[in-house]
Image (cartoon, rainbow, N blue to C red):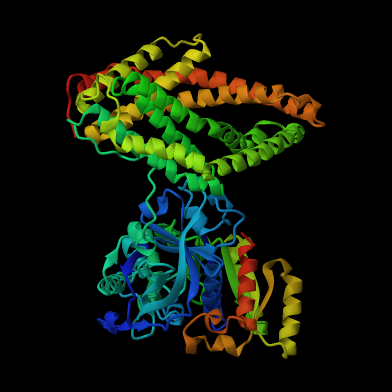
Amino acid sequence: MKVVACYSNKGGVGKTATAVNLSYAAAASGLRVLLCDLDPQGASGFYFRVKPSKKLKDDTFFRDEDRFAGAIRGSDFDNLDILPANMSYRDFDIFLSRMKNSQSRLKKALKAVDGDYDLILLDCPPNISALSENVFKAADRIVVPVIPTTLSERTFEQLLEFFVDHDLDRGKLLAFFSMVQGRKTLHHETMEKMRGIYSELFLATVIPFSSEIEKMGLHRAPVAAYAGGRFAARAYSMLWAEVGARF
Amino acid sequence: MRRVGESFALSGRIRGKALGKDVGALRLELEPEAPPVAFALLDQFDCPLGKSHRALIEAEGKLILLAAQAGGREQPAARSGHFIADLQPGPVGEALSDLSPLRSLLALGQGRMVVRRATLLDEEEKTQARAWLRRLEPDGPGAVVTLVELQYLRGYDLAFDQLRRRLRGAAPHIELEALAESLFPGTPAYEAKPQVPLAPGEPAARAAAALIGAHIAVARQNEGGVIADIDTEFLHDYRVSLRKVRSVLSLFRGVYDAALTDELKRAFSDLMAPTGRLRDLDVYLLERDLYFDLLPATLHSGLSAMFDLFARERAAEQAKLARRFGEQAYADQIGRLQRVFAEPDALAKGPMADYPVLGYARKLIWARYHKVCKLAAEITDKTPDNEVHALRIGCKKLRYLMEFFAPLFPASQMAPLIKPLKRLQDGLGLFNDYAVQQQSLRALLATPGADLRDDAEAIARSVDALIAILHQRQLEQRARLTDSFAGFDNAELRARFAAQFHDGGETA
């Protein structure tokens, strides 16, 4: 079982869209996939029409294997299950601070479904916290969407610094450019610059800014489910192919 | 254990009305029917899929496997042949790995299939349970059956149960085991080892006739498959059935008049004789991969030439046998024997003819068991091969007797006796295979004119190397046999045999 986190320390970068569409693409490729929504806002669950979990709240997530497994719901798509979020996840840091081995609790919790899945995708909330440290430990690969703007560049640098300061494995990071607008010169210049500096960290696939992706909230489904032939859907499937090849 | 899907069959067509609209708080949505497509129901000749409550459908370029306890799987149907190994790698092929690699998949019948989907949705239009309804309309006089593949969506157990209940209630249920018979009635179920019912007080001669009649019938069921050359198991089963007939004739001593017995033995031997060479060639060709694995690549060209020879000869032998099976003379020959055993009372009796079969069975098994033990006890590392072969034959006879008479005894008593015997037989069989393979390879080299071929030298080199390896394997197997004897020839098993067949143990 492999664990891939969709993570960014900046909000609004297309993180949930990435988690939803990557998990769909991975499942379509034949892998048994669990998308685990760690963001208390529950957007991943919303896109799959799965209601927030009632029973898996507070620290049961980390303490109760049966409840963890029992909260999983099958999506409408083959091979793809969802662990929906609960509002109480906003207090994850508090629960974690009370636990022993607080940095590896997530890894331990995911073991409850080891064997049921080939791949677990984590949709993470946008901050650097005790939970994100758990994510960095549990994940084999961390997919980081980066909008090619100055501000995103800065948060990406902060993430890298955090990895260095905490002696984390930078090799896990797989960044890609997200919500790219082809007509914006700034986007092109930033991408060129960042590829120059962090070439080994960036994937080749670029996810465009697209109205098809925006419509996910309307359709409440992954892009490929309602616009399979369109460029945005193909881009996510290419992105998955690239991520999958990094194992 | 994690839940999975479920499959079952329902009689006839499932109409929307029968399913209703809402199920509790959930909405039942029945999609319109897709246009009809052609389908075929596949299984091997002895129907291992049906017997294990599975159904394999080929339609629209896909193989769809439904299992009573596990829902459905699909993969592309395109394949290089009809054996399990010929399927593309995929979930269906994986789930069929328990099937015989020697048996070809057959279309048991064809027809039209109409697919539609039933879904249970919640108020957010989330699917909570889903079922594929595949209505099978067979060509011919069979009944319409709807196959239901219920998909389990994790965490929605209640909806799954609700949809299942609704569907199950929509029409009478048909076991997947009975699917083929419902769709395509009249195809007789094939059972290579028929259980012939025997009454304890039945005269031995009648029991013998019933066993022989049943096994001739099994042999005849295989004729079509031999003619069509579907797979090598047809001829194998044909021969095994007739061999069992001959065993009844020789093992059931005294049930028929001696002269009649001899005549019948000859008649069955004549029936089998024309099949021997084809079976030998089938066996060689089945070993092809093994031989290639045994030899280094430098010797493979000789092997290829050898197997080309075998393949050509096999094609000729198969054509010859197929012709023979199609001839009136053959039908007369085997038909006459069939009729002889259909009227058992008309057969000239031997001194044991009216002996009650239960006592007769005990006598035969007990005596045969003793003989086998005596042979086994004398075997050491130095015993000549032919005595090991004699033991193998003895074991086979004992096994046949125990299988013929199995309906007379409780299954629970027979199983622990047959198991160690089977283990011993497997070991002896392997030893014998190595010996026979060497023999036949030598025979190949000795074939008149073999040395005149262009590739004679290459073949001879490969064959020599193979014989050396097989000889080594035979020696190793010989050393292993001692353990199998110990598992068979021991006080505990002897006591069990005595209790069942000598001291008058339980009967069925």
Where the C terminus of chain B falls, by quadrant? top left
Residue A106 vertical position relative to residue B122 in the rendered view, above or below: above
Residue, far right:
B454
The quadrant in which residue B375 appears is: top left
The quadrant in which residue B489 appears is: top left
For the residue pair B279 and B388, the one nearer the viewer reads as B279
For the residue pair B405 and A196, the one nearer the viewer reads as B405
Residue at image coords 28%, 31%:
B346
Where the N terminus of chain B falls, by quadrant? bottom left
Where residue A73 sits: x, y (%)? 38, 71
Q: How many marks?
A: 0
Horizontal side of residue B443 vs A61, given as left or right: right
Q: Is residue B102 visible?
A: no
Q: Is residue A48 visible?
A: yes
Residue B104 vertical position relative to residue B494 in the rendered view, above or below: below
Horizontal side of residue B362 vs B82, given as left or right: left
The quadrant in which residue B365 appears is: top left
Where residue B457 sits: x, y (%)? 79, 26
Residue B406 vertical position relative to residue A97 in the rendered view, above or below: above
For the residue pair A234 and B55, the one nearer the viewer reads as B55
For the residue pair B107 and B257, the one nearer the viewer reads as B257
Horizontal side of residue A106 vs A30, given as left or right: left
Where residue A107 sits: x, y (%)? 45, 59
Residue at image coords 65%, 35%:
B293
Residue at image coords 63%, 77%:
A234
Where residue A152 sits: x, y (%)? 63, 81
Residue at image coords 47%, 67%:
A79
Horizontal side of residue A206 vs B132, given as left or right: right
